[in-house]
Image (spheres, rainbow, N blue to C red):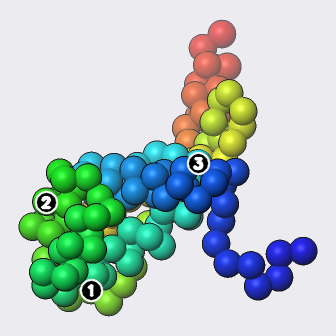
Amino acid sequence: MRHAVFGRKLGRDTNARQALLGNLASSLIASGRLTTTLAKAKFARAYVEKLITVARKNGLAQKRIIANKLSSPAFQKLTKEIAPSFKDRAGGYSRIIKLAPRRGDAAPMARLELIKVGKKTEKPLTVESIQKKSVARKQSKSHHH
């Protein structure tokens, strides 16, 4: 029983977990979206949200904390573009969209993406929309034969 046990281990030791978290956060911040397993997406989401909250304060101490955790391009983008764009938003900077399971091992997959502020975003690909497309394809194939 895992009563009152905080956090996730993801089958890694502490250093590997910290490295994974830093890499996931850097990738997400640099590109704006990230496709990974659902467990890793949930793991990285809280970390990234906290980094953005720290970055919004925009002081030297905050910048040093963030620089210690992210790659250089991700740090630049976070401090110059992302944090200022979220200055009026009280949390909830990212979303997790569940995707179809991974082909090799059927691991549940998800896309973690930063929410665009002020712009209408395109409709995200969800498991339901993928399934609807495949059903529509199967029906159209069966009508041609």
Which percent across, then down, holds residue 92?
A: 39, 79
Amino acid type, residue under disc 3 in the picture = Thr
Which percent across, then down, holds residue 58?
A: 14, 82
Instruction: Specify few, some or many for label 2: CA neighbours under 10 Å numbering under 14, 14-19, or 20 or more.
Output: some
Q: Could you tell me how far apart the alpha carbons at marks 1 and 2 are, in whole angstroms?
A: 20 Å
Amino acid type, residue under disc 1 in the picture = Arg
User: Which sits earlier in the primary sequence, circle 3 or circle 1?
Assistant: 3
What residue is rendered at 55% in x and 38% in y? 133
The answer to whether residue 22 is left or right of residue 39 is left
Q: Could you tell me how far apart the alpha carbons at marks 3 and 2 are, in whole angstroms?
A: 26 Å
Question: Can residue 128 be seen from the camera position used here?
Answer: no
Instruction: Specify the quadrant of the image occupied by residue 117.
Output: bottom left
Q: Mark 1 points at which residue?
A: 89
What residue is rendered at 19% in x and 87% in y? 57
| Pick the front one: 127 or 37 | 37
Instruction: Specify few, some or many for label 1: CA neighbours under 10 Å numbering under 14, 14-19, or 20 or more.
Output: few
Looking at the rendered structure, the secondary structure element under dot 1 is loop
Q: Mark 2 points at which residue?
A: 76
What residue is rendered at 17% in x and 51% in y? 73
- Front tag of 3 and 1: 3
In the picture as drawn, the residue positioned furthest to the right comes out as 1
User: Which sits earlier in the primary sequence, circle 1 or circle 2?
Assistant: 2
- Front tag of 3 and 2: 2
| Pick the front one: 60 or 50 | 60
Q: Name the residue under label 3.
A: 37
How many numbered marks are there?
A: 3
Instruction: Specify the quadrant of the image occupied by residue 139.
Output: top right
Which part of the image, by quadrant, shows the N terminus? Answer: bottom right
